[in-house]
Amino acid sequence: MTKYLPSYYEHLERQLREVFDQLTEQLSEKERRWISEWIDVGEYGLAVNALLEHLREKRSITPPAVIQRVRDIATAIGLADEVEKELPGD
């Protein structure tokens, strides 16, 4: 298992919170609650997967820059396959 410095996780959490804040109005109450909780407890993979699933459904109303940030975060944490599954063709 690869170990990362605390600063890596702090940076990742900050990025996720910024994206989460940009998408808050699009997310359902349930999505907001779960994604926020997963970020709070460090379950970043679950949070990113939920964001990818959401973007698959709301792609047409989501700014391309936000979609790209989620793609970049997902790829950085090893979820490139999930990116291609949920947002193919980008």
Image: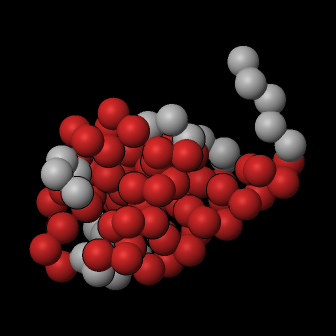
Question: Residue visible at 51% across and 35% down?
Answer: 78
Say above or below: 77 vs 62. above
Residue 46 seen anywhere in this rendered image of the structure: no
Q: Quadrant of the N terminus?
A: top right
Using residue 87 as the reference point, say whether residue 78 is left or right of it: right
Whole-percent x, y for residue 60 in the image? 13, 74
Using residue 8 as the reference point, say whether residue 86 is left or right of it: left
Q: Quadrant of the C terminus?
A: bottom left
Question: Residue visible at 29% across and 80% down?
Answer: 63
Q: How many marks?
A: 0
Q: Residue furthest top?
A: 1
Say above or below: 20 vs 73. below
Whole-percent x, y for residue 87 in the image? 22, 51
Question: Residue visible at 22% across and 39% down?
Answer: 85
Coloring scheme of the render? secondary structure
Residue 53 seen anywhere in this rendered image of the structure: yes
Question: Residue visible at 18% across and 67% down?
Answer: 58
Whole-percent x, y for residue 9 in the image? 74, 50
Specify the quadrant of the image occupied by residue 17. bottom right
Using residue 1 as the reference point, say whether residue 70 is left or right of it: left
Whole-percent x, y for residue 46 in the image? 47, 41
Using residue 38 as the reference point, say whether residue 11 is left or right of it: right
Say above or below: 67 vs 86. below
Asked whether 29 or 90 is in front, the reply is 90
Say above or below: 76 vs 79. below
